[in-house]
Image (cartoon, rainbow, N blue to C red):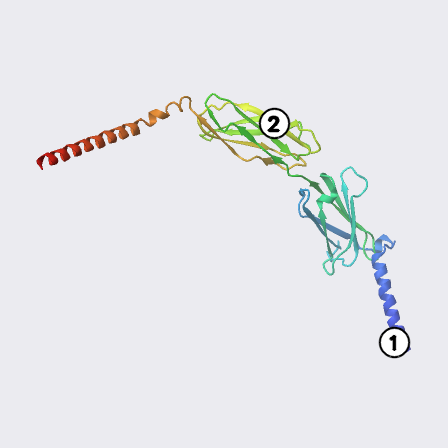
């Protein structure tokens, strides 16, 4: 190989390495010689459900003309509000030519629900000044609410028991569950009930009460919990309750009376027809 060409190639390689090094390493230059930079930061949701993927995306650009800054490092740190140490700390390279970056976070690995912040930072480079941006979000849970009604069929004046469990709510004690009892005419009664601790390793609370329906017909019963800052709202399935008027069971045979009369008339008619048939047969026998 030509020595001059070989030397030129070596200088180009060294130059490229030097440019790459200067681009990724912070360099303390006079403030006036660097352009201000900006980080834009977006979240796919500010209330991710624990176990879901939170998408954190952003863009690094210059402030003056909004030009993207590609192929440089941006650091993302995730802090639980109140903590001093980051739970998640990642560094990524901005895309070329868009200057964008993206982090997919499995919220299960953030370990705790509640309020969080993510801080995106860019250290000063050869051309651009340092920049940062912060977004906040809250990791929440989806509790489950059950409802049991017993018995499902009563007579007006009898009491009905209902109870249920609010499971996997954090925190949910010293709170209320609202039970809606919907009459056959679609008016309803609202009963707020205090949650009591269930004990055990899983958070939850139970409620129970008695109720005396005031209207015959088909009722519908549903429990509702409004949620809180770290638990989403939830409601139970709708349970049906059948309320009969007093004496409705005794009036059942009276309702069958018309059918009994019809049956009796039919029996009498059949008997008369058979009797007439028997007389006709005897007359024919005597005539022979």
Could you tell me if the residues under marks 1 and 2 are in contact, i.e. CB atoms within 8 Å?
Answer: no
The answer to whether residue 90 is above or below residue 151 is: below
Q: Where is residue 266 in the image (x, y as percent from the top left)?
A: 25, 31
Foreground disc of the pair 1, 2:
2
Q: Residue 207 carries which label?
A: 2
Task: Tell me the CA gap for discs 1 and 2.
Answer: 85 Å
Query: Local crowd at mark 1 within 10 Å, few (<14), some, or many (≥20)?
Result: few
Residue at screen point 88% across, 74% down: 6
Q: Can residue 106 be seen in this view?
A: yes
Tag 2, which secondary structure? strand
The answer to whether residue 287 is above or below residue 36 is: above
- Give the side of residue 149 with respect to residue 243, left or right: right
Tag 1, which secondary structure? helix
Q: Where is residue 26 in the image (x, y as percent from the top left)?
A: 85, 54
- Give the side of residue 208 with respect to residue 259, left or right: right
Residue at screen point 91% across, 77% down: 3
Residue at screen point 78% across, 59% down: 71
The residue at the far bottom in this view is: 2
Of residues 115 and 61, the one nearer the viewer is: 115
Q: Position of residue 68 (x, y in %)?
A: 74, 57
Q: Where is residue 25 in the image (x, y as percent from the top left)?
A: 85, 56
The answer to whether residue 271 is above or below residue 75 is: above
The answer to whether residue 85 is above or below residue 19 is: above
- Give the side of residue 182 with respect to residue 281, left or right: right
Number of numbered discs visible in the structure rendering: 2
Of residues 150 and 122, the one nearer the viewer is: 150
The quadrant the N terminus occupies is bottom right
Q: What residue would you read off at disc 1? A: 5
Q: Is residue 135 visible?
A: no
The residue at the far left in this view is: 287
Query: Local crowd at mark 2 within 10 Å, few (<14), some, or many (≥20)?
Result: many
């Amino acid at each position: 190989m030509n020595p001059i060409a070989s030397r030129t190639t070596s200088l180009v390689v060294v130059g490229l390495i030097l440019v790459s090094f200067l681009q990724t390493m912070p360099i303390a230059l006079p403030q006036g010689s660097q352009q201000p930079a900006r980080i834009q930061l977006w979240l796919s949701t500010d209330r991710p459900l624990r176990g879901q993927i939170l998408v954190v995306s952003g863009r690094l650009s210059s402030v003056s003309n909004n030009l993207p800054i590609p192929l440089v490092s941006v650091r993302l740190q995730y802090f639980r509000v109140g903590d001093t140490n980051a739970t998640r700390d990642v560094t990524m390279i901005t895309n070329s030519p868009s200057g964008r970056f993206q982090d997919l976070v499995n919220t299960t690995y953030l370990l705790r629900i509640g309020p969080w912040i993510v801080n995106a930072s860019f250290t000063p480079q050869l051309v651009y000044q340092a920049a940062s941006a912060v977004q906040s979000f809250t990791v929440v849970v989806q509790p489950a609410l059950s409802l049991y009604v017993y018995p499902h069929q009563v007579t007006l004046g009898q009491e009905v028991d209902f109870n249920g469990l609010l499971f996997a709510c954090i925190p949910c004690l010293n709170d209320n569950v609202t039970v809606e009892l919907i009459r056959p005419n679609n008016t309803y009664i609202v009963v707020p009930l205090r949650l009591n601790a269930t004990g055990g390793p899983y958070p939850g609370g139970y409620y129970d009460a008695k109720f005396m329906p005031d209207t015959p017909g088909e009722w519908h019963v549903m429990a509702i919990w409004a949620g809180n800052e770290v638990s989403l709202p939830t409601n139970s399935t709708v349970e049906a309750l059948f309320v009969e008027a007093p004496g409705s069971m005794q009036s059942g045979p009276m309702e069958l009376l018309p059918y009994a009369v019809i049956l009796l008339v039919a029996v009498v008619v059949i008997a008369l027809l058979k009797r007439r048939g028997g007389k006709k047969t005897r007359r024919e026998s005597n005539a022979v």
